[in-house]
Structures are given as C-alpha cells and as structure tokens.
C-alpha cells in the first residue's frame, strides 16, 4: 500500500499491547527504513491520505489549475465581440450591476485582433498565438459567472466556493475525496501563491483535517526557481549521511520508548513520519531540479527566456509533480488587474503565459497524461467591456471565460455565451459552483455526497448549489 | 405589516382609476408575450404542481403571493418587483432563469407588463401577498425542550462506589461508578515524575525544571502535589497557557485575513486582557459579560491600571475576519453580525446558532426568528465605522473625556502654530531677519508642542448604535426581507427570569442572560472546555456543539456536578482546575488496565489518561525553556506593523516575525499566512472558533524537527550550555535527560549517547575536515536535536 508523507494517523489505540511489544522487539533489531517499510505496510497505518474509491468511475485523476491572479480580460483573449468593436465609445445599452467595484465609462473595443483557430473555429485574440494553436484541446466556457466583484472575495469563491467565510479550498476537498497517490510528496501543492486576497485560505483546509491543506512551494514574492517546501532544507546544511545518523539515533530513542510504553499508533506514526520526511527532502529537490529535461523541453516551456521563465518553470513543475502522483497542483501568475494601462500590461502578461501553457498541454498529451489530467485556466473574474479611463477595464464577475483541457472535459468545445458586449453571461451560464460540481464529477465524485460534518452541519464544496454541466463533459 | 406588503397595497391603490390600455390590447399583449414567456422559461420549476421555493408563476395570485423570498411582483412597480431583479441577473444571489438569461426585449416586455398593472385575464391585481408572518412563538415540542442540554443542571449527589479507597474527589465517584458498572478497573496512578510533568505542561505549557522535579520527589508530605498545583496556578505562565486556550475559542488574530490582510494593530490588547483575566482568576461570568457588553458596564470613574479592560474585552466581538473589500455594505454588515452570532453561540452556549441564518435550524429548536432576534441585538452594536471598501472597524480611545479633550486641545494649539508658520513663510512683512527670527521661535514651539501631544491608546471595541430590530432575511439574503422580529433570545432557552430588553441594543441583557446561573448551557459549556483542555477529550466530545448533532455527554451527572460547582464557587476557574487535578481520575496513568483497554478502546469511560502530543506552543516554549533561552516578558505589542495597514508579506519580514524567544502566545497570528510551524502542528484556524485542535502526525512536523532554524538554534544553545557548565560527558548526558525528559539517563542510555558522540565526531571530521574543530560542538548539537525531537519529549503521558 502506498502512503503519502503528509498522511497522519488518527489515534485509536488497539488492544493487546503484549503482542505489539513482541513485534517491536523484532523491529528494534533492524535499524532504519527496511524494517520500517514492513511496519508501514500494515493495514493499521492506512492514513487519511491513502487513495480512496471514487463515487463512480473517474475521467480525471488529477488537476492542474493555471490561476491568473487579478482577473484577465477575457473579452480581449477569448470572448470575441464584434458588436463591442462597433459600439466603442457608446454607453452600455442595459443596466450595469447594482454592485460594482468602481465606476466605469462607455464601451471600449478590444485593442487586439481576433481570429478563428483549429477545427473548432474558436476565436482567440492575437495575444495568445501559441494557445491558439492548441485550441482544439480546449473546452472553452464563455459563460462563467461568480458572485463577487472584489479580488479577495472572488478568489475565495473560486478556490473555496464561499465569498463570505473561510472554507476548505477545492484542492483540499479533492484531496480529502480522493486521497493522494504520491509516496513522498504532499497530495496538494501550490506554486508561488498570492499572499494577499485570501492568502493561505486559498489553499487551506479550514475545518477539514490538516492532512488536506495545500503545501505552498514559495509564494508570489519568491521566484519559482527559489521556491521550496517549508523546512525541506536543513538549516545547517548537514550532509545527508550525518543527518541519517542523527535520524537513526532519534528513531532508536523512539523505538526504545515505544517498547517501554507498549503499543501506540501515534508514536508509531511519528516514527514513520520521520522516514517519510527524510525521503521527501530528497525527492522534492530532485523534482525541482530540471537539469535532466531536454533542451527542447526547457525551451518549449520558455525556460530559456527571462519573460516566460517564471511561469514556464511552474508549468514544468506541475507536469513533474503530477507524474509523481500529486493530486492537485496549482500554478499562479499575475497580476492581471489592468484598471489602466491595459494595452501594455495585458500584452506583457499574455506573453508570459502563452508559450508555457501551450507547452504544458502538448507535453501532457505527448506523454499520454492529458486524458487523465484536468487542466483548468482562468482568473477570479474577467473584466468589463466598459472602460475605466481610456485604457483600462474594471472587474467583471458577471460573464467571463475559463477553459478546461483534458481530464474528461469535452475538447474543441465552445460552451455558453455572454451578451453582445461580453458583460453578462446570458446563455448556458456556468456559475463557479457549477464549475466545482463539474470538476468533482470528472474526478469521479458526486458534489452532493462529498461532505464533511463541522459545527453541526454537513458542508460541501458547492454548499447547497452547483450543477454538473454535461455540455463540458466528454461523452 | 411588513414594508413589502405596504408597498404592495400602496401600489394597488395608486392604480385605481388609472386609464390602462384597452383591455383587448392588454389581453393580446399578455397572451402573446407574457404568458408564453412565464410558461416556457419559468413554469417548469415554478408552477402550482412543482413550485420550487414555493413560487408559482402560473397565476397572478401566485406571483403576488410569491415564494419563500416574498412577493415576486408588485403591480405597477417593476423596480420593486423581485421578478425583475431576478431576470436582470444583476444581483449575484438571485438570477433566473439560472442558466440562460432572458433576451433583453423579453426583460423589457416583462417590465412593461408589470408597469402597466400586471394585467392577467380573469384575475384582479388586488393587494395580496406578503410573506407569511414570522412564527416567533412557534411551538417547540416537549421533546425538543427536554433535550438534555436545555434542561437546567441540578447538582447531583455523587454516586456510591465499591472501591472507596480510590476516591479522592467527588469527580472520582462519577467516573468509578461507570467503570464499576461495566466491570472495569481504572488505570493505576501515574508515577510522581509523570504527574509533575503532566501538571506543569497542562497548567503552564512548560516543562518542569530538573530542580522542581527533585524538590517534588523529595517532598513526602501528603499535600505535596496540592502545593505544586497551587504554585503552578499562581504562575503567570498559567494565564499565558490558559489564555491561549481561550484565544482559540475567540478566533484571535493580529490581522484581518480573509480578503484584505490588514493589521489589527491593537488586537494584542484583547490578547493581554485574556491572559490577565486567567491569571487574575476573573470569575467566568464576569469575563463573559465583559466580552459581550464590557463597554456598557465599564465604569468611567475607575482609574485603576486595568480600568479599560471591559472596553478592551469587547474586542472579542470585533476580532473576527471580515470581508473588508465587500462592495455590498449591507451584505458586509449582515455577514459580520452572522460571524458574531455564530461565535457567541458556539463559544458560550455550544449551539450552532449560525445555522438558522437562512432557515430554521434543521436539528436544533432554533428558528430563523430566533436568529434575527439576536441579529437585531448585534446589528444595534456598531462594530464598523465604515462599511464601504475598504471597510474600517471601530476602535475606542482608552482615555477619559478630559484626557481626550486635552489631547484635542494640544492638537489644535499645534495646528495654530503651524498655520502661523505657513502664513509667515508666505509673508513679506517686516525684514527678512525679523521674519527668520520669528520663524525660528515658532519652529521651536512647534517641536515642543508636537512632542507634548499625549499619545492615547485605542482598542478594537464595539459601541451601541441606534437600537433597531432586524427583519428575517429569507435564505439569508438582505434582498428578500420578511417580517421584523423583536430583539431577544432563542425561545427554547428563554425563561421567566430571562432579562427583558426594554431599551438600548439589548447587548447588556444578552450578556446577563448568557452569564446567568440559570442558563442551562453556559456553565456546562465552559466546564466541559476545561475538562477537554485537561484530558484531550471532553465529557461532551464536541465542545463547540451541544446540540442534537453534537455528542451526548458520556458522564452527564459529572458534567452537571462540575457546572454547578463552578457556579457555586463564584465561577472561579482556578478552583475547578484544582478539583480536577486533585482527583484520582486526573492522576491515572496512560497505561490502562488490559481488560478496560479491550472493553473501552475509545476511552469513553475515562478508564485511563490519554497520551497526547504537545501542541506547538508547548513544544516550542518548552524547547526555549530547556535551552535556557526563554524570554519570559509578559504581554505588550509584538507585531511590529502599523495599525490598519496591509501586512508586509515579504519573506524577510515574515521570518523576522518569528525569530523571537518570547512565548508562543505572543507570536503574531497572521491570518492568511500563519507561521509555518503553527500550520504544520494543527494550530487553531484563527478565522474560526476552535474548541479542540486536531492532533495529526504529518511529515512537515518531522521536517520542522529535523531541519528548522528554530530547532537547530535551540539545540545549539543547549549543547553550548551543557559543554560550558559541565566538564564530564556523562554528567552532560544526564543533565540533558533531566532537562528534556524530567528524569535521569539510564546507564545504557548514557553509554549509547557517548558512543554516538564519538562516532559523530569521526564522521564529522571526515565530512567536514575544514571544520574539524567544530566536531565536538556539532556532535552535541546533533545529540540535543535528536533528544528534543524524540517522542519522549513530544508526548505527554
């Protein structure tokens, strides 16, 4: 049986301490991880992160979320609106939402040219030339909508389903529902997450046990190259054999104590946790060392270019981590909040992610991983078709685009519509709750059954909402 | 009559006699555009046969009566019609049809139809509808009222037991009676070293020093343990330990978290107030009253050092995390009220009152009307000074009115001088020299005045606003209001002695009602919390939920005995600690009787003590104490960041926050970015009330022990101290064991340690020839780290 190092053992002490003590006597003779491997394989150690059965057969086994922090303007990327171009400078002919984040002016045409691509004929703007080439892999949802017009609340809603309170993140729910398949890595990792607008709550487990919380590798103020799992590097830079020696002593102290006090799951689990940690601290740096990748791969992800290097490395890491059985990986990029200077900012930001994203999708496909890996792209909201100043757009949670690829999503699909200007989603609307319900569905989980009892009620990622959108599920 | 019903009637009246379009034309428009639209796009879910949310759109009466959110249309008033809000999709919480919005022309036709009086052939647009009146006095069943937690505790007589020799305290009779009933034996008593280590960690969050251990072992007087307990309860470390437990319940933090991680620069005053209250053994009923309504019972004539404590205490209500950048101020206010109700309900009553925000509680007899009766009280308290983005919480200046006016006067003086300076700088009167001289004088005065302005501290606090009752919010939404409910307390818990809210917000009455000895829950809940924090599990194992979905007490009479003793003792928690620690139950070993292990594997009968992993604070503070580095400074501001500013998230700033030797209770609690060590070790989520922490065993905890700078530094200091103070290696090892484990090293353990030191030094010299002179120190550091990381330190028996 495989074990995740982040798994914990809940302590229920077993009876018959005598026989356990006898067993430990044998183990004490052996030193180190060989004897422990046997101990770990005992069913009693099935931790909370061991793989769990799905509710029904899954199409996707894992998720990579490419998060665009700040709110990319999807009317400038995917949601082509000829009427917006025609009516630029005119007032919006229908009411703006009652609640908005700031005042806006008249309609503003997209400064970028759109063209249709691929068999699906999806419109993609000139900002994303590489993504345009893989558009037939994408299931583009143009009718996304959320409830909140502010970054923090909208990000919390995107990541946790609630724009009101602190709730478990979707990565935590998914890891809780499915467990992890990784032996020496956390089940849920997030690269360089934002520390603002929700910070750790965006990948936190809230009331779910800590086993399911996301592990941040770096944060948004650390380059992806420098990003590390907390405490994975020895503060003294000890050589591995010296640290092993110290660990052997520690484990001997622990086993001696265990023999003295009799059977105790938590004491045994803690002994194991040190072995797993020791393996993890070797595995994680290996995984983050990309020197073994070919020059072509590194170049395809954009690691040879200072503009694309940051997000490219995150995308490459995402592939390497999911190859090792990690359940949920999030990559973060920003900051797309172009209230002004839209032309320059969005051109730069799109360029930073275009090549890495296309490379990731192609790489996953070529390795046969795309079928079982659900890739999700998007921000906490889109941006208004009406202008702020002459060159900016405000937050718009009422109608915007996200896309999925692989993992049982329907490729080459254009789903839903916004109105003629791209302000409100009007057709086949997909609320964030629906997105969550559908993601869980693809992972083999029924969103109404994935519950956790806390403070007197059964909580769900989708609260009392959410509907699986069959139109974005591959039949 | 509700506001909405009033509008409906007014609307109906105003349309009497208005010349509508010819009836035929209206009928034709209705049949052509409106009825088909309603049928095709709405009726599938909202018709008489299958009315979701109880709304039926297949008749005018149905639309006017509306559903659970109130009337759907107000004839003549499209802007006042819920239907129009829904079809426009301009509100996040109500969008119909949900998936595909109606076309713009369709929406306009509906609006026109309503504006024209909502003509429906064969039906009259009479003033109908309005939500069903709130059923405030809804009958609560006898069964619900008789639920154990709602019956007042009555001091029970401790039961008779066979093994009277085991009984040291009435507590033991309750526990032993159950064990004897089950034919089981309690675990033997723990040895004296274990007892002292357990008591010291539990009461102070620190290990006993080797000297304290030896003194205790040498003291064979019968009251030796009792005196040890009294010494521990009197230590300021007790308040730091038990105050921290309460801070878990109070979801204490130094930043807002949630969306905008803004610094709560004065939160520490509440933290210190809590610590002080535990140290002073403030009666719990008073502690409760102060946190709910301290501003209303504050005595302005008190000029003692802690005179403002009751004001600071109300920080409890304000310290939760808030969506400070919420664009909808009404939603924000109701979300804050909800957070307060949820926290107060679970903290003091063990009731999940928050569940009744959207509908009657599904499991407990708490109605939505009960919820909004409380919501009126909290809404009448001003938590926020500004509700628009970025919202600002209220703070109160901790000074007398005289001090405040003196400060304001000083500010005014300074402003005057500055005005003079500004005028003089522009002036051309007189000579340049005379102006320069005058300016210099003024500048001197400016500096003097500026330096003399008294600095007045402030604290997060609430203040009463204009009292007002709240309306029921259907589905928790402020867009669909129902009847207004008078401010008050949940019906099931009301009694004849419950205070009446005559005037004011009702917060003082709420505090009195919560702190009343006749409230069936308050004393039970805090007594159970105390038991939980001592034993690792409560008598009710769900300490924050005493409702139907919570656990039932394993020992109801014991819980009632503890609760009634607490009240009889004047709500003094230290007395309750003393009673618990001086019982055989508390003093049992973690090794149970083998038969009891088999019969009661979950230890529901408390047949033994639980072995517990130290929490992060005890583990960290203990390491600092052992290495001799613990800074025992009490209280004060510790997050060095400006109030109301965004917290610096840079790695350097974050690292600096935790590089301190103060006790863990004083480390900054950053919501949205908890200290890595805290989050690895199941620290309480600072955004939510936590009555019982998880105790997971996960790899990041091992990484912390093996690799962190913190453990490395403690090990280094400890090694340095041993090398410096003792000349003999065996004596050093013995001291190490006494410091870390509270016992001497056994001979073979000393031997093993010495062999390890030798071997390590050899390997070190091989691996690091350039640092060969460090070999001995490094070997000791390694031995110290392994000793500190070992289970014998990390687990409490």
Image: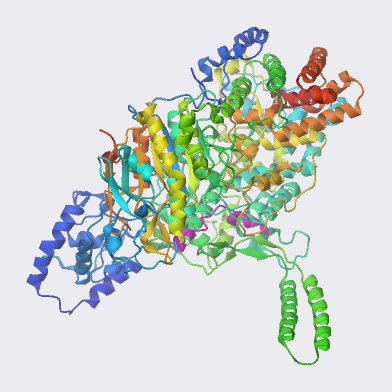
Depth check: give the residue in front, A463 or A338: A338
Q: Is residue A455 visible?
A: no
Depth check: give the residue in front, B685 or B155: B685
Query: In the figure, is residue A447 to the left or right of B195?
Result: left
Q: Position of residue A58 (x, y in %)?
A: 34, 28
Vertical order, B405 against B398 (above or below): below
Count the numbered circles shown: 0
Vertical order, B212 against B270 (above or below): above
Q: In terms of image quadrants, where is residue B790? A: top right
Q: Is residue A148 visible?
A: yes
Q: In terms of image quadrants, where is residue A289? A: top right
Is-magenta flag for residue B557?
Answer: no
Q: Position of residue B208 (x, y in %)?
A: 80, 32
Is-magenta flag for residue B331?
Answer: yes
Q: Position of residue B683 (x, y in %)?
A: 61, 39
Query: In the figure, is residue B65 to the left or right of A261?
Result: left
Quadrant position of the C terminus of chain A in the picture: top left
Q: Position of residue A89 (x, y in %)?
A: 33, 68
Vertical order, A453 against B417 (above or below): above
- What colouring style does the render use? rainbow
Query: In the figure, is residue B491 to the left or right of B308?
Result: left
Please provide the residue range marked out in magenta.
B312-332
Depth check: give the residue in front, B496 or A157: A157
Query: In the figure, is residue B784 to the left or right of A244?
Result: right
Pick out the residue farthest to the right: B727
Q: In terms of image quadrants, where is residue B136? A: bottom left
Pick out the residue farthest to the bottom: B430
């Amino acid at each position: 049986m495989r074990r995740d190092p982040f798994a914990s053992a809940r302590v229920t002490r077993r009876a018959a301490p005598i026989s356990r003590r006898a067993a430990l006597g044998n183990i004490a003779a052996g030193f180190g991880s060989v004897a422990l491997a046997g101990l770990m394989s005992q069913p009693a150690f099935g931790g909370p992160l061991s793989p769990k059965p799905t509710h029904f057969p899954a199409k996707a086994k894992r998720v990579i979320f490419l998060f665009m922090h700040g709110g990319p303007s999807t009317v400038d990327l995917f949601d082509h609106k000829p009427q917006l171009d025609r009516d630029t400078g005119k007032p919006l002919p229908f009411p703006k939402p009652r609640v908005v984040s700031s005042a806006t002016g008249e309609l503003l045409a997209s400064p970028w040219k759109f063209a249709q691509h691929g068999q699906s004929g999806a419109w993609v703007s000139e900002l994303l030339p590489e993504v345009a080439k893989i558009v037939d892999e994408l299931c583009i949802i143009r009718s996304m909508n959320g409830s909140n017009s502010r970054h923090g609340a909208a990000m919390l809603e995107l990541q946790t389903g609630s724009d009101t309170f602190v709730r478990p993140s979707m990565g935590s729910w998914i890891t809780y529902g499915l467990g992890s398949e990784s032996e020496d890595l956390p089940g849920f990792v997030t690269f360089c997450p934002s520390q603002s607008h929700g910070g750790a709550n965006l990948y936190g487990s809230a009331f779910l046990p800590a086993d399911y919380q996301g592990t941040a590798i770096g944060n948004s103020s650390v380059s992806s190259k420098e990003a590390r799992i907390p405490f994975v590097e020895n503060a003294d830079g000890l050589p591995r054999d010296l640290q092993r020696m110290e660990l052997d002593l520690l484990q001997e102290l622990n086993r001696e104590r265990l023999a003295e006090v009799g059977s105790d799951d938590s004491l045994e689990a803690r002994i194991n946790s040190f072995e797993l940690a020791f393996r993890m601290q070797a595995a994680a740096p290996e995984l983050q060392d990309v020197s073994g990748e070919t020059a072509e791969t590194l170049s395809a992800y954009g690691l040879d270019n200072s503009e694309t290097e940051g997000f490219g490395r995150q995308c490459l890491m995402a592939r390497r981590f999911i190859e090792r059985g990690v359940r949920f990986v999030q990559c973060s990029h920003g900051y797309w909040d172009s209230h002004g200077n839209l032309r320059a900012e969005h051109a730069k930001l799109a360029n930073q992610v275009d090549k890495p994203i296309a490379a990731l999708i192609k790489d996953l496909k070529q390795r046969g991983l795309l079928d079982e890996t659900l890739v999700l792209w998007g921000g906490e909201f889109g941006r208004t078709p009406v202008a702020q100043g002459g060159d900016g757009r405000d937050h718009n949670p009422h109608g915007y685009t996200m896309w999925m690829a692989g993992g049982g999503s329907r490729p080459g699909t254009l789903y839903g519509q916004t109105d003629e200007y791209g302000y409100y989603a009007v057709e086949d609307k997909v609320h964030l709750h629906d997105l969550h319900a559908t993601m869980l569905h693809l992972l083999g989980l029924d969103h109404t059954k994935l519950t956790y009892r806390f403070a007197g009620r059964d909580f769900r990622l989708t609260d009392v909402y959410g509907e699986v959108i069959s139109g974005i599920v591959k039949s | 009559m509700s506001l909405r019903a009033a509008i409906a009637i007014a609307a109906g009246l105003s349309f009497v006699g208005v010349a509508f379009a010819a009836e035929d034309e209206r009928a034709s428009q209705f049949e052509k555009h409106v009825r088909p639209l309603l049928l095709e796009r709405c009726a599938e879910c909202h018709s008489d046969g299958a009315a979701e949310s109880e709304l039926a759109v297949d008749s005018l009466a149905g639309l006017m009566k509306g559903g659970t959110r109130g009337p759907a249309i107000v004839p003549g008033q499209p802007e006042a019609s819920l239907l129009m809000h829904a079809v426009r999709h301009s509100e996040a919480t109500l969008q119909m049809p949900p998936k595909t919005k109606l076309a713009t022309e369709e929406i306009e036709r509906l609006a026109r139809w309503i504006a024209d009086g909502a003509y429906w052939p064969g039906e009259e647009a009479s003033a109908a509808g309005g939500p069903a009146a709130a059923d405030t006095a809804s009958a609560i069943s006898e069964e619900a009222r008789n639920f154990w937690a709602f019956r007042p505790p009555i001091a029970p007589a401790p039961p008779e037991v066979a093994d009277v020799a085991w009984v040291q305290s009435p507590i033991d009779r309750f526990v032993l009676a159950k064990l004897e009933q089950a034919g089981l034996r309690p675990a033997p008593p723990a040895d004296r070293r274990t007892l002292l280590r357990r008591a010291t960690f539990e009461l102070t969050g620190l290990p006993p020093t080797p000297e304290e251990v030896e003194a205790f072992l040498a003291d064979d007087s019968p009251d030796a343990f009792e005196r040890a307990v009294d010494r521990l309860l009197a230590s300021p470390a007790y308040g730091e330990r038990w105050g921290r437990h309460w801070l878990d319940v109070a979801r204490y933090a130094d930043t807002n978290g949630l969306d905008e991680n803004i610094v709560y620069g004065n939160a520490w005053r509440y933290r210190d107030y809590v610590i002080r209250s535990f140290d002073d053994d403030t009666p719990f009923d008073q502690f409760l009253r102060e946190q709910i309504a301290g501003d209303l019972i504050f005595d302005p004539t008190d000029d003692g050092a802690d005179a403002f404590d009751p004001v600071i205490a109300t920080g409890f209500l304000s310290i939760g995390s808030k969506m400070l950048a919420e664009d909808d101020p009404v939603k924000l206010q109701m979300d804050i009220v909800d957070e307060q109700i949820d926290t107060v309900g679970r903290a003091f009553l063990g009731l999940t009152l928050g569940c009744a925000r959207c509908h009657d509680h599904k499991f407990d007899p708490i109605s939505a009307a009960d919820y909004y009766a409380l919501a009126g009280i909290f809404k009448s308290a001003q938590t926020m000074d500004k509700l628009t983005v970025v919202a600002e919480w209220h703070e109160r200046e901790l000074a007398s009115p005289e001090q405040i006016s003196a400060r304001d006067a000083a500010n005014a003086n300074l402003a005057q001088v500055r005005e003079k300076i500004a005028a003089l700088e522009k002036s051309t009167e007189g000579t340049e020299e005379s102006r320069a001289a005058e300016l210099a004088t003024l500048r001197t005065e400016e500096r003097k005045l500026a330096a003399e302005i008294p600095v007045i501290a402030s604290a997060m606090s609430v203040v009463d606003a204009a009292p007002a009752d709240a309306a029921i919010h259907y589905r928790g939404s402020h867009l669909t209001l129902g009847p207004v409910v008078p401010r008050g307390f949940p019906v099931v818990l009301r009694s004849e002695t419950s205070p009446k809210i005559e005037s004011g917000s009702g917060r003082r009455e709420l505090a009195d009602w919560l702190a009343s000895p006749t409230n069936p829950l308050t004393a039970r809940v805090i007594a159970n919390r105390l038991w939980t924090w001592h034993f690792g599990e409560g008598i009710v194992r769900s300490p924050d939920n005493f409702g139907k979905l919570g656990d039932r007490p394993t020992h109801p009479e014991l819980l009632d005995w503890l609760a009634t003793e607490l009240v009889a003792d004047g709500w003094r928690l230290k007395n309750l600690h003393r009673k618990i620690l001086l019982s055989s139950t508390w003093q049992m070993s973690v090794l149970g009787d083998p038969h009891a292990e088999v019969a009661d594997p979950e230890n529901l009968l408390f047949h033994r003590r639980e072995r517990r992993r130290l929490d992060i604070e005890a583990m960290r503070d203990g390491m600092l104490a052992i290495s001799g580095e613990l800074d025992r400074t009490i209280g004060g501001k510790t997050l060095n960041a400006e109030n109301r500013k965004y917290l610096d998230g840079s790695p350097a700033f974050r690292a600096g926050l935790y590089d301190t030797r103060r006790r863990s209770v004083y480390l900054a609690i950053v919501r949205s970015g908890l200290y890595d060590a805290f989050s690895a070790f199941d620290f309480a989520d600072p955004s939510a009330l936590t009555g019982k922490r998880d105790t997971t065993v996960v790899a990041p905890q091992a990484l912390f022990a093996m690799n962190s700078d913190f453990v490395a530094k403690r090990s280094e200091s400890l090694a340095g101290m041993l090398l410096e103070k003792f000349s003999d290696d065996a004596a050093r090892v013995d001291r190490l064991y006494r410091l870390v484990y509270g016992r001497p090293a056994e001979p073979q353990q000393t031997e093993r340690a010495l062999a390890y030191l030798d071997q390590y030094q050899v390997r070190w010299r091989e691996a690091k020839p350039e640092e060969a002179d460090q070999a001995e120190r490094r070997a000791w550091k390694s031995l110290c780290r392994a000793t500190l990381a070992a289970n014998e330190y990390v687990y409490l028996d």
